[in-house]
Each structure stands twice: as structure tokens, then as C-alpha cells.
Image: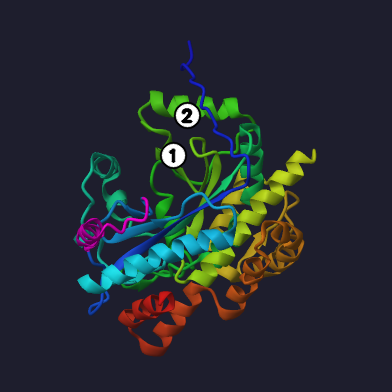
């Protein structure tokens, strides 16, 4: 007999709604090192009664706070929601001498001095993953987009992997680690995939295949709960969404709005094409894996594989055409301005390049942290 398979109910979203989760690090205002100050911050949040309906979350480490939105219909609504929460948190961080820092990694912090948030889920993760789990000084942005029916989820997810390098290259903000230049635009992407259930998703064709996979994972003790599957893109059945977890931490609201708009438009475009009866294109897993590595290594200078015929192209050239193609979708979703701002990220220089420029100019990793902090302000 095989492993018993339980049905996984997907609570479909009637509209392509949005939810955004923005992880931010806490850094000391004077030393610019990471600060394990989250307990003090959450004490203030409780004392002042300013949690904003659960919009401010704890994370694995005490050096992190996560800002989340409610269910939003537009990018503008999501950004307004996040902005209101950010304003509340910034008012409190002033009182405890820390600043918020939005990047994929911290350039010089030591992992061994970071403290775990109390809780059995976090303790169990570290007990299982040991050294690699303790290394996870990483921050990202997660974007949920509502999907109406479970049978759409896996075709959209597999096709969305074609645009993985575009999203990672745009958001790459983790070039330094442990006081060293890594040579990678996104060292975070390389770090996170070391956890046993993280990394690229498997490309299943049917929902029953996904259910069988989850059953195997639970039977063998790899996971206890579905949310312990930490893929870079994953179904969130209880929310009725696809969750995109590709992106590095983002340092400012304007770039965050552009990246969220791009993800929203990509998923809605794929959803509409599927609804219209089209077969969505997808790429072999080995090509997707290579594209992830190229984007992590070279950022916006990556030459990516753009189709199953192995044609190659500079990611920024492909992105420029993609933004034009998605304009009608953006217009229908009310995010034309936000989508257009994606081109400004490339023109300005992605975060990893800006950090390298500061270091080349000052020779100071403390100044690098300060420059990222200043962008949020």
C-alpha cells in the first residue's frame, strides 16, 4: 500500500487580490550592526496598542520585524496599508535606538550573536537545520496573488518560473556577507535554498500530484505543516493564493511598489491566458535552475535562457519588452505608474550595485548599512 493521501482544499479567491509581506532588519543606530531589539519593539507595540490588526509580525530572529498587509485589491492599496504600518513602527524604533534596514543580507553582522525568537516552531527549525538554520541572516519580500480555482495554480506557478530571473535581478540586494564581497548580486537566494524544503518548487501537472507530494513529506517527517514547504514560489491553499518568495529585501517604498506591480501583472496575465484556453509556456527545471543561479550571480547583467529552445538574452532587454507587453494588464489593475517605475530601478541601479558603489567610495561597510537605512527614510 502507498502513502495515504489527504485532500488539500484550495480556498479560491474570487478576485486576483494582493497581500504583501515585507521583512525588515533592526540595526543599531550607532554601530549599524544588527540589533536583537524585536522584543523591546513588540513590548512598545503592545503598550501603545498600535498593532494595526495584526499587521506587525515577529520572525525567526529577534533582529527582524515583518510588516504585512491585509487583503488588497490594488498595488496602491497595498502600499498605503504597508506605509501606515511602517510609519507606526518607525515612530517606535526611534525610542529604542534602532533603524529599519531593507536588504537581503547585512554586510558584516555575525550570525553567532543573533538571538532566536521564542516559540516551539522556531526552536524546532533550528534543531533540525542546525548550522545552516543559524546562518539565515536573510530578509525578503513575499507577495500573494489570489487565484480563483486550484486547477489554475500549478500551471501558473510553473509558467511563472520563466520570470524568476527578472524578479531576482530587480530585487537583488545581498552582495556582501560576513564582511566579505561575495561576488553575487543575491547571496540570500543561494543561502536560503540550503534549507531542506526551500529553493525552487517542483513542477507538478495536477493538484493530485501536489497532494501526493505533501502526503509523502508528512509521512516521512520532512514537514508537519504545509507552510513548512518554503519554496521560492508556492501555493498557499488556505489563503487561495500563489505566494512569490523570490525577491530579496527591498530598501524603499517606490521600488517595492514596482516589484509588487510586476508580480501582480505577471500572475494575472498568466491567469487570463489560461482562462482563455491557452497552454502556458514553461521551461525545464534544469533551465529554471540555471536562470536562478545566473540572476543571483550577475543580477541585472545576467544573460538568461528565455525559452525551452534555449535562446538567450540579457535580462534587462527581456524585461523592457515584458513591461510593454504587460501595460494593458496593468491598466486594468490600476497600477500603470507602479509598473512603469520598474524601468527606473534598472536605470538607477539595483540595490546590490548601489551598495557596492558606496563601499567603493567609502571603504566602509558601516556606511553601506547607513545608505540602505537612508533609502527607507
Point out which mark residue 214 bears: 2
Secondary-structure class at tag 2: helix
In the rendered image, the residue lying farthest to the right is: 277
**What residue lies at 51% left-to-right and 22% top-to-bottom?**
7
In this picture, residue 345 sits left or right of residue 321: left
The answer to whether residue 323 is left or right of residue 140 is right
Tell me where residue 227 sits by quadrant.
Answer: top left
Label 1, residues with CA under 10 Å away: few <14, some 14-19, many ≥20: many
Q: Is 317 on the left-hand or right-hand side of 364?
A: right
Q: Residue at x 33, y 65 (%)?
A: 25
**Taking the image as drawn, is residue 331 in sight?**
yes
- Residue 97 locus on image (x, y percent): 22, 74
| Residues under numbered marks 2 and 1 in contact, where contact means CB atoms less than 8 Å apart | yes
Quadrant of the rendering where the C terminus is positioned: bottom left
The picture quadrant where one finds residue 56 is bottom left
Q: Pick the residue in front: 185 or 22.
A: 22
* 238 vs 144: above or below: above
Q: Mark 2 to mark 1: distance in Å? A: 9 Å
- Label 2: how many Cα within 10 Å (few below 14, some 14–19, many 20+): many
Residue shown at 41% from the left, 53% from the top: 192
Residue 229: assigned label: 1
Q: Main secondary structure of the magenta part?
A: helix
Magenta includes 250?
A: no
The segment highlighted magenta reads: 36-53
Kind of element beneath mark 1: loop
Whether residue 279 is visible:
no
Which x, y percent locates residue 94?
A: 26, 74
Amino acid at each position: 500500500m502507498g502513502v495515504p493521501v489527504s485532500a488539500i482544499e484550495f480556498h479560491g479567491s474570487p478576485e486576483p487580490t494582493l497581500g504583501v509581506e515585507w521583512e525588515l532588519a533592526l540595526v543599531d543606530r550607532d554601530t549599524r550592526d544588527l540589533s536583537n531589539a524585536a522584543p523591546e519593539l513588540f513590548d512598545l507595540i503592545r503598550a501603545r496598542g498600535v498593532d494595526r490588526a495584526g499587521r506587525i509580525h515577529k520572525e525567526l530572529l529577534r533582529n527582524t520585524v515583518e510588516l504585512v498587509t491585509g487583503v488588497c485589491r490594488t498595488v496602491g492599496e497595498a502600499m498605503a496599508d504597508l506605509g501606515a504600518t511602517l510609519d507606526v513602527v518607525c515612530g517606535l524604533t526611534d525610542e529604542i535606538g534602532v533603524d529599519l534596514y531593507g536588504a537581503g543580507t547585512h554586510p558584516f553582522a555575525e550570525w553567532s550573536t543573533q538571538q532566536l525568537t521564542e516559540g516551539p516552531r522556531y526552536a524546532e527549525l533550528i534543531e533540525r537545520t542546525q548550522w545552516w538554520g543559524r546562518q539565515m541572516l536573510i530578509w525578503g519580500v513575499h507577495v500573494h496573488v489570489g487565484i480563483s480555482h486550484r486547477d489554475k495554480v500549478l500551471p501558473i506557478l510553473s509558467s511563472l518560473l520563466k520570470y524568476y530571473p527578472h524578479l531576482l535581478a530587480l530585487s537583488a540586494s545581498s552582495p556582501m556577507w560576513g564582511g566579505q564581497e561575495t561576488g553575487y548580486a543575491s547571496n540570500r537566494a543561494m543561502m536560503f535554498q540550503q534549507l531542506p524544503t526551500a529553493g525552487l518548487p517542483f513542477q507538478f501537472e495536477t493538484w493530485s500530484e501536489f497532494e501526493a507530494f505533501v502526503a509523502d513529506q508528512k509521512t516521512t517527517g520532512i514537514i508537519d505543516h504545509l507552510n513548512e514547504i518554503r519554496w521560492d514560489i508556492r501555493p498557499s491553499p488556505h489563503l487561495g493564493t500563489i505566494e512569490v518568495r523570490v525577491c530579496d529585501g527591498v530598501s524603499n517604498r517606490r521600488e517595492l511598489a514596482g516589484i509588487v506591480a510586476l508580480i501582480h501583472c505577471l500572475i494575472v496575465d498568466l491567469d487570463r491566458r489560461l482562462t482563455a484556453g491557452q497552454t502556458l509556456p514553461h521551461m525545464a527545471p534544469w533551465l529554471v535552475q540555471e536562470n536562478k543561479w545566473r540572476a543571483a550571480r550577475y543580477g541585472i547583467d545576467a544573460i538568461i535562457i528565455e525559452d525551452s529552445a534555449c535562446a538567450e538574452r540579457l535580462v534587462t532587454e527581456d524585461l523592457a519588452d515584458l513591461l510593454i507587453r504587460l501595460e494593458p494588464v496593468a491598466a486594468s489593475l490600476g497600477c500603470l505608474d507602479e509598473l512603469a517605475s520598474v524601468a527606473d530601478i534598472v536605470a538607477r541601479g539595483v540595490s546590490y550595485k548601489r551598495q557596492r558603489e558606496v563601499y567603493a567610495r567609502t571603504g566602509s561597510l558601516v556606511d553601506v548599512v547607513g545608505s540602505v537605512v537612508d533609502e527607507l527614510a
